[in-house]
Image (tube, coloured by chain):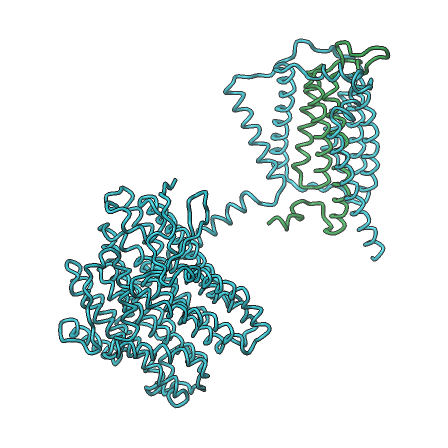
Amino acid sequence: MTILLALLVAILYATGVYLMLRRSIVKLIIGLVLIGHAANILIFSAAGVVRGRPPLVPEGMSGLERPYADPLPLALILTAIVISFAIVAFTAVLVRRAWQEIGTDDLDRMNTTDR
Amino acid sequence: MLSLRRADPGMGYHAARGGSLVPMLLVLLATLFVTALAAPAVVRFARPAAAPILAIVPALATFWLISVAPGVLRGEPIGLVRSWVSGLEIEFALHLDGLALLFALLICGIGTLIVLYAGAYLGTHPQFGRFMAALLGFMASMLGLVLADDAIALFIFWELTSITSYLLIGFDHERADARKAALQALLVTGLGGLALLAGLLLLADAAGTLRLSDMAAARPDLPLDPRAAAIVLLILAGAFTKSAMAPFHFWLPGAMEAPAPVSAYLHSSTMVKAGVYLVARLDPALCDIASWSRLLVAFGAATALIGAFTASRQRYFKRLLAYSTVSSLGIMVLLVGLGAPQAAAVYILAHALFKGALFMIAGVAEKRTGRKDVEALGDLRRAMPWTAAIAPAAALSMAGVPLFLGFAGKELLLKAALSAGWAAPFVVPCVFAAGASGVLVALLVAWRPFHAAPEAGALPVAAREGTPLLLAGPLLLAGLGMLAGLFPFLGARAITDAAALAIAGPRGTGLVRIDVPALAAPGAALALSLASLVAGVLLYRARARWRAIAALGGVIDAASPQRGYTAALDGILRAARFQTRLLQNGRLRIYLFVCLLSTIGLVLLAAARTGTLPGVPADDVAISAPDLVFLIIAAVAAIVATRLRGRLSTIAMLGGVGFAVAMLFLTFGAPDVAMTQFAVETLTVIIFVLIFHHLPRFAVFSGPWVRLRDGLLASAFGVLMGGLVLLVRRDAVFPPISDAFAARAAPEAHGRNVVNVILVDFRALDTLGEILVLAISGIGVYTLLRLFIRKEREA
């Protein structure tokens, strides 16, 4: 299974990077979202996957029995999902504003201040 | 690092009049700096009388200096030591000896006249306050420079004079020429300043003291030190750039872009003499190093000659005076190098008096006639009788006519040149040429416009006499030059003698004072002096022909260091522009491309060097059919998303990836993550639909080759990251810390969901940070949306 997850990580990174290399700023955002997914799965599968055993301590017990899904990367991914949502929401609104002001979604025509 | 012995504070000083005098040096400096800061306010509130009010401070400083002069001249210098940077054993030391007194009197005395002159010259300028601040700031820095007895303090004041003079030269900052000249002066003197700092630190290290007045006696064997050559070269680089020695002389004529008061002050009597002062101050410590004296003589004489030749070809007031100043600076350096301190001191004083006066007169003539070309003017004595009367008084001193101080300077100079030994055959012609050129310049500046008939066909000039305040300075300076020449027993002789003793340093005990009467005794020196006078007059009479001949010297211009400076500056700017265009091209995808390519390359390099290859982990989970479905959905949706051009279909694909990934989380024991992902994914899709709805269809901006290139890079990066997953799985080095979290969640944090416990308890601060990010993003989104709703309403 790990090898398939690794393949998915590869595809998500490749598509995400490809989209970020485009000139359209909307595609850049979509690439950002895809790379976010890719990073989450990278962390997820790097810790080793376990089928159907969430890290929930059963009633009446004080600890977990192996094997169980590693809770630390899951906590990290939870944080990452929320933060990437915040970033994507902000960027999307920013792009909308930029389109309204500049009338283009071509990054090459938005970079006058960078020169 | 410097290893300095801590000198006994106040060692070697005799407080001339008890302890009360000692802090006066500090008070003097501080008052001048404060006056500079207060100048804009004074100008604002007392505009018509501002200059006379401000002139009170340097005038008082001058009187104080005169009042302490007798003690200093008796050989009782005033000193002051304050602890400064105690960790580095640096002390702030001031020292007023004969040499410092000569310069301090010039700085404060001429400074007073310049402040008055500037008030009359520029008083109505809207930025006169700024001008006075820079001028007084310069005066204070210059005074600090000549009073400093500590190498570090000397360097700081040295740099302060560079900066304030930058502000003064570029005062008229709306003109490109003035800005360029100011920058050039700053760069040349600033670079020299850096060399000077290095040289001073090396010298202080070699001598074992930062105290300038201790350096001469500190190391009798300094010439044997392996650093001696470096010390000499670095210090001379600083002194020669500041004093416009060839080949660094090119910035001085450019600096004439400054208003006339600045030229008269900085470029005749003070700033350019800072290099001469430095050379004179360090001569006692360094004169035993053979290269020091030789370099001083060689560069001094060469500069005197080049300055004299270039000056003789000019026709504009300020250029004539600027190049003749270059020539004179060369002579001063030459005199220090020849070991003729008395001649140097007299020449410095004489030059400051006549050149200051002539610069001020040139300023008056330029301002009152609107002409810069001396040949375009004539018979100004009718319109400007006072100016016409004062100008020759200064010019006669410059020409070295008997009875004037300039004559004494020239006499001593020629005597020193004639007794220069091996260097005499080279030095004497240079000095003679400088003398003849000086006579020519004096005639052109002070005689030609005022007393000769205008050129046939010259346009009539409307001239008005200068105001009394404009003429007071030149009158006083020219008068002093005459009095000091006529009555050498007045103060001037005592001051120059004291300065000469200070320049001579420990050698001074054997110094023989040469008496120079107003009318010299016959001898070779007198003959040469008179011959150069005649040569100058002849040059003046035949100047049209001389300019035609001298124009052949235009080859010098072609090889001039000015060109080197321009080429170097252009080269630096071109290189900067090139690398900015290359590195900061404003294209995100190129930044990304470079970063990713470097990452891939570095990782591959590391893998190749360690021979690491990813493999399949041993303890893997078996694949089930539903997993496969979600994996394929996510992969296909992601790939399709790169190809689509419609907005909604792309968003649908994005949603597909998100939900499939969430299902994978759910399958592999992460229900919390899956729930969050579902919620966030739904929100993301809604936001995208709402926002992208307003955007156009995606355009394809890049050609097929670019897309192929990007595709290859993206694939390579994907493979790299996929490989990373496998690598990490196989080579887990450390045992996971999650066991501890799992074991402590229920008993210690009273939570059964370990992920939740980590988020809200074990790593609660991280979660707080996350909430903060979310809140900031929310505020950002809200603000942007409100902005554009308001805009739409207005539209």
Residue B93 placement (x, y as % from top left): 40, 54
| Nearer to the camera, A64 or B704 | A64
The quadrant holding residue B270 is bottom left
Q: Which residue occupies the extreme left position in the image?
A: B523
Q: Colour of chain A?
A: green
Q: Colour of chain B?
A: cyan
- In this view of the protein, can residue B184 be seen by the observer? no
Q: Which residue occupies the extreme bottom position in the image?
A: B382
- Which corner quadrant holds the N terminus of chain B? top left
- In this view of the protein, can residue B81 be seen by the observer? yes
Residue B548 placement (x, y as % from top left): 28, 73
Q: Residue at x 72, y 30 (%)?
A: A36
Question: Please, is residue B784 above or below residue B366 in the view?
Answer: above
Left/right placement of residue A38 relative to residue A115 reads: right
Q: Residue at x 25, y 72 (%)?
A: B549
Residue B182 placement (x, y as % from top left): 46, 62
| Nearer to the camera, B440 or B19 | B19
